[in-house]
Amino acid sequence: MPSFDIVSEIDLQEVRNAVDQANREIGTRFDFKGIDASFELTDDKILMVGEQEFHLQQMMDILRQKLVKRKVDLDCLDPKEPVSSLNAARQEVLLKQGVDSDTAKKMVKSIKASKLKVQAQIQGDQVRVTGKKRDDLQEAIAHLRAQDWGLPVQFNNFRD
């Protein structure tokens, strides 16, 4: 039976490149001269460190620009509240990967409500959609693309 998977993945290499470019830009910008500001990338988050919350806002704009240039979907970013102390401010930006269970349930419910002749099932952090005809699967993809899920959605592993 034809099938495809609904996943939410980001290219971590492109994110790493964007963070490196953002660090370089901060080092050369005049408004960041003499200020201790930097981006740090860990497995699933980006830590922004600056002297004031105003700097963090500017750094977030720089990061978004670099990610857009590298074709990374901005829906994968989940910025947390900035934390300020006397001489430093920090902010974590979480990177969302995988379809969480609540969103997966909404996707399955949406597919069932569309009355398409396909079945959807949750498999870990992805959703598998199967159907008898390839055209039904393409209609399901079009139906899912028309909605906003709050995270970047890709359709892969399309099989006949």
Image: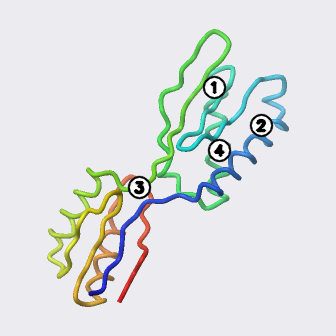
The vertical placement of 32 against 147, above or below, is above
> Gap between marks 2 and 4, in whole Å?
10 Å
- Residue 87 x %, y %: 68, 12
Work out whether mark 4 precedes mark 1 in sequence or the reverse, and give the earlier one: 1
Other residues around mark 3 within 10 Å, as few (<14) / some (14–19) / many (≥20) = some
The vertical placement of 15 against 128, above or below, is above
Give me the disc on residue 98: 3
Work out whether mark 2 precedes mark 4 in sequence or the reverse, and give the earlier one: 2
- Residue 50 x %, y %: 68, 25
Q: Nearer the viewer, residue 35 or 108?
A: 108
Dot 2 falls on a residue whose secondary structure is helix
Q: Amino acid at mark 2?
A: Ile
Which residue lies at the image location 42% right of the left edge and 63% below the top edge? 153
Is mark 3 in CB contact (under 8 Å) with mark 2? no
Disc nearest the viewer among 3 and 4: 3
Residue 128: name its quadrant. Answer: bottom left
Q: Amino acid at mark 3?
A: Gly
Residue, disc 4: 63
Residue, disc 1: 54
Is mark 3 in CB contact (under 8 Å) with mark 1? no
Which residue lies at the image location 66% right of the left edge and 59% below the top edge? 70
- The quarter in which the N terminus is drawn is bottom left
- The quarter in which the C terminus is drawn is bottom left
Q: Amino acid at mark 1?
A: Phe
Work out whether mark 3 precedes mark 4 in sequence or the reverse, and give the earlier one: 4
Q: Amino acid at mark 4?
A: Leu
Work out whether mark 2 precedes mark 1 in sequence or the reverse, and give the earlier one: 2
Dot 4 falls on a residue whose secondary structure is helix
Count numbered badges in the picture.
Answer: 4
> Gap between marks 2 and 1, in whole Å?
14 Å
Residue, disc 2: 26
